[in-house]
Image: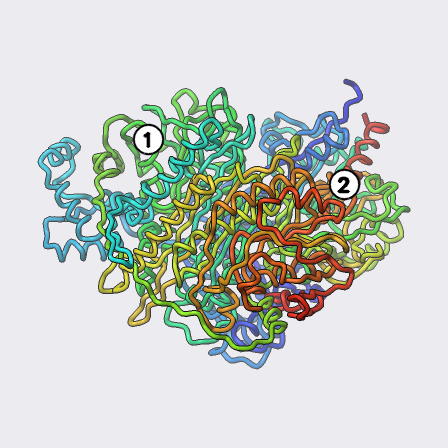
Amino acid sequence: MAKEVRSLVIAGNGTNCEREVVAACRLAGSEVADAVHIAEFLAGRVKLADYHFLNLAGGFLDGDDLGSAKAGANRLLHAPVAGGGASLAEQIGQFIDDGKLIMGVCNGFQLMVKMGLLPATDLNYQRQSCSLTHNDCGRFVDRWVSLQTDSDSPCIYTRGLEGIYLPVRHGEGKFVVDSDTTLAQLEAAHLIPLRYADDNFSPTMDYPANPNGSVAAIAGVCDPTGRLFGLMPHPEAYVHYTHHPRWTREKLPEEGMGLWLYQNAIGYIRENVV
Amino acid sequence: MPCRIVVGLKDAVRDARGERVKSEIRQHLGIELHRVRTLDVYTVDAALTAEEIEAAARGPLSDPIIQQVAIDRPLAADFDVLIEVGFRPGVTDNVGRTAREAIQYLTGRPFAAGEAVYTSVQYLLNGQIDKAQAEKIASGFLANGLIQRWTILDKSELDPQKGVPATVPKVDSSSAPQVQKINLNVSDEELLQISRDGMLALNQTEMKELQAYINNPAVQASRHEQGLGAELTDVELEALAQTWSEHCKHKIFSAQIDYEDEKGQKETIDSLFKTYIVGATRDIRKKMGENDFCLSVFKDNAGVIRFNDDWSMVFKVETHNSPSALDPYGGALTGIVGVNRDGYGTGMGARLIFNTDVFCFASPFYDKPLPPRLLHPRRIFDGVIEGVEHGGNKSGIPTVNGSIQFDDRFAGKPLVYCGTASIMPSTLNGRPCHEKQVQVGDHIIMTGGRIGKDGIHGATFSSEELHEGSPVTAVQIGDPITQRRMFDFLIVARDRGLYNSITDNGAGGLSSSVGEMAEDTGGFELHLDRAPLKYPGLQPWEILISEAQERMTLAVPESKIAEFMQLAREMDVEATDLGQFTDSGYYQCLYQGETVCYLDMEFLHEGVPQMQIPARWEDKQHQEPDLGERDLQADLLGLLGRLNICSKESVIRRYDHEVQAGTVVKPLTGIANDGPSDAAVYRPLFDSFEGIVTSHGICPSFSDIDTYHMMACAIDEALRNFVAVGGNVDHVAGLDNFCWCDPVESERTPDGAYKAAQLVRANKALYDYCVAFGVPLISGKDSMKNDYQIGDTKISIPPTVLFSVIGKIEDVRLAVTMDVKAPGDLVYLLGVTADELGGSEYYRMCGELGANVPKVDSARALKLYRTLNQAQQQRLLRSCHDLSDGGLAVALAEKAFAGGFGIAADLARVVGASDLDDAALLFSESQSRLAVTVKEENRQAFEALFADCDLALIGEVTTEEALVLHRGSKLLLRTTNGQNKEAWQAPLREL
């Protein structure tokens, strides 16, 4: 099977959504979709290079004890790999250079931002320029949100999508930037493929449609290649109509809107990577 | 030299935590502050270079975009008073642990023994306050003195160079380990004193039993061989006290009870548990025959029933009341992660799929004086909810079902019920996964967290009422991440067949876990000095009974030890070999090679004498009140705003109820995702549409009239919630969780015989209704001392049983929700309405109790529920909602506003209406009733199906968003959806 798409979720130390992300990847057509515990990487038995699509899943890495995903980012940067192999951070760098795809959801998005993988406006994947911090309401919140997409964005995942509807489930989802310049760069380069929106799919700063007070209503960002993407809402949580909170009262297609993001990613890989 | 790293937000970044603290200080204490800001402090007590400290501070410990850092100097400026809150020595500090791990990754060097990172939080207060008020804020809101310490400085007291002086809450470990001997050949009075002083919670008969054991010449001889003296050691006495505790042995449920009813009829009950609970399940399973879906009942940490050919479902509900009374956050967090271990530790292990939680509190708006040592109900509310939030969310387990009951008697003891369902393959490596068997020679392996003094005497403590000397060590703080790592490891070990048996370390710690597992082989040898400790200085008996969290005990065969240990190391989980299971017949513990405990297994497990409890039921001659003329419209709005009825959305949204992507019917539903679902429907497998349904019933307010009917109503409520969404009433099992006030007559409990009779009656109903409905009981728990007693003040909770159910729905796509779907649909009421307002929410709102408690007709109900299942299979229902607190009017109001359409109904058509006054018609809490809506085109099919049931077409769904209820031509009430929803949402919206 030369053309098979291989998807991966790194699990362990508090990731929680690895099973449903694997299920979403399979449903979207990935021939291989594995949840692999980080111990397998640190033991040197599994390498990122064996995969095309890296998913960093939702959860509470190390309990988010030092701030969301902080301790997790530190582990990827510094944990030694047995036999002196390349660290996970180095393997991720190579993965990006190889033109492969990375999607971070919720805690995975926080992890990417805090490692500097996103938004990497200057393609420097090691400098943090943004962050995700406590929701303005000061609390964890689970609710469904409407999201506006940007058709001019290079983001591979949101290609062809108009508005989407997904759940958020987080306490630290407020997107902030280090400077107005960064925000201007994000806007100019269309690196904000997803924004929290009202019922008419217009971006909003109003709670609860914007559940955390993110600047510019940012719900997700991508890097300039569009191959790296992170978002607070959970696409893996809406891949079938029975995930929708109103499926008992609305006529809905079999496939959920979250699945589209995975289909786009896997379609791209099939055409460009494998 | 310990160093302090202070991390704070940059000036331009909003401090959401500080803002929340400010508003909560106002709500809790009525103190208005101008501003509150927060700083995080890491006190690093480890040999690190200045460069390493700097790298840690700028690396994992802070975020360069939003935070600033100071090392050994203050960040605090421009404040009036500063409060810094940190932990007391030995209290679990999860953030400190994570910080230590992060620094180790950074330096590539592990911390030396005794080195650690300790965390604290600085609150910078601005406003008109003095240090006395700050003290009140610290002790009354920010900190819990049982587990935390604090420093208060005003602006003039802060050293501008050095900041707050470093405090290192290191455990002082000067005491050398030693084993004490206890002479039991003393007077009866002194025996009781030994029990009281040692927090053993053993009564005089039990102490005498120990005295007789130790004086037995055969026992003396066997002890002599082991080099033990003629007196029990403290290790032995503690092991016995744990094993014989009410918490572990359920002495009240096993007691012989002499019951006398109101007519003077007497009967003797030999164990409530065996007679009514085990008895019901036995009789039901016999009747089910080949269709028996029970796989493992009562014998394991949780009950197991069949899901399908390939999978089995596991369910357990626990309470964590006493710890939650002392430290609501830690107690509740520990409750949820603790019941998670029960779920995992059943059979060979099961993957956790969802949590449930039910709380019983006093009103958070309670404004009367509180007796000493009780926390304000608002603090309990906030702390418990946050604890369960962190426990569930961080563990990645969705909280799918729950409720909150309010009664001011729960100020004496809040009830915190935490449930967990899990799923296991029906067979594992060729054997049933729900079975396990320790083999002689297997190693005793402890995995997960380390042992500290936390939770010492938890089992015996919860077997007593809350009193002046309740120990601080009974409080623990859970650590979801350590536990998560352990579960990730154990499921791999399970699938590779690396162990023979597993159980969790809960109440009683190693003493209980190893003791219970050793019943398979008939003995064990445990080396206490090999156990990994959080800090030195623990006595051998403390190691044995500590309830430090996040630990499982496993039986690993010799041939698998190396592979098991290697896997644990790779997955960053601590695993320690503590000894072996034997067939010696003895419970043997050693410390540094010397035997310090040598007890006959049979005596330990079977020796506890049966209690004798008198129970006398009295007819309390309750009366129905005369309420006169009332404004029914105002009454409906009043009921919708009652704490027991109103929306719990502010709590529900703090719980992740969708992680794992299986929640098909969520806790909130309807057009605006905010209507109250009756039950949860959960799809556990991605390759099948078969689902699990869970729901519960709880109605303590009926206990004030008759606990028999309280129990019957709780069972019916759970089942009708379950069938409302589509659960198969022929594939459902129950769990009973009793929370009682002390039912043993004594000087302190003069009404014990009545409380015991209440317990007997609840058990009789449990048997009668479970058998009638064909619902086997698979697991349960009792918590029997939910009283507060200090000085002359005694507060006893109302007798409360949570009845939880778990069962099957064949296809989740057939599930039905409670919200009305479209105008023109027909509204039916199923079931009979009777004059049953006794103990109702309506009477309670009017300040009355009444007499006519609802009674359940199980035969009629079961027929109705089975027919409802057929209607669901045929897709005849568009919505279905159970009637409970507040009766018909509340249920219709909820259906309407959840669906975004109105309901117009003529209640004269209700079955039973002719015998009722208007209030009873609207608000009676008669059981086994459901309100459904049906498409006009399905009318004939629907009515034909229900031809033999109690069915009334009462109205239709309207486009006008209002509830309009007539009785014939008379208008009973007319309210808009907007009014109803506002009344229902307002009370707890801001909490």
Q: Which residue is drawn at 38% across and 51% down?
A: B454
- Which quarter of the rendered picture does the C terminus of chain B lie within? bottom right
- Residue annotated with mark 1: B579
Q: Residue at x 43, y 26 (%)?
A: B499
Give the SS element for disc 1: strand
Residue that lies at the very extreme toward the right in this rendered image: A152
Residue B224 lies left or right of residue A37; in this view the side is left
- Residue annotated with mark 2: A256
Which of B617/B59 is in front? B617
Label 2: chain? A
Label 1: chain? B
Which of A9/B468 is in front? B468
Image x and y of residue B866, in percent: 56, 41
Residue B714 lies left or right of residue A110; in this view the side is left
Q: Which residue is drawn at 32% across and 52% down?
A: B760
Residue that lies at the very extreme toward the top in this rendered image: A1
Disc 2 residue type?
Gly
Q: How crowded is mark 1: few (under 14 residues within 10 Å), some or many (20 or more)?
A: many
Which of B528/B819 is in front? B819
Which numbered marker is on residue B745?
none
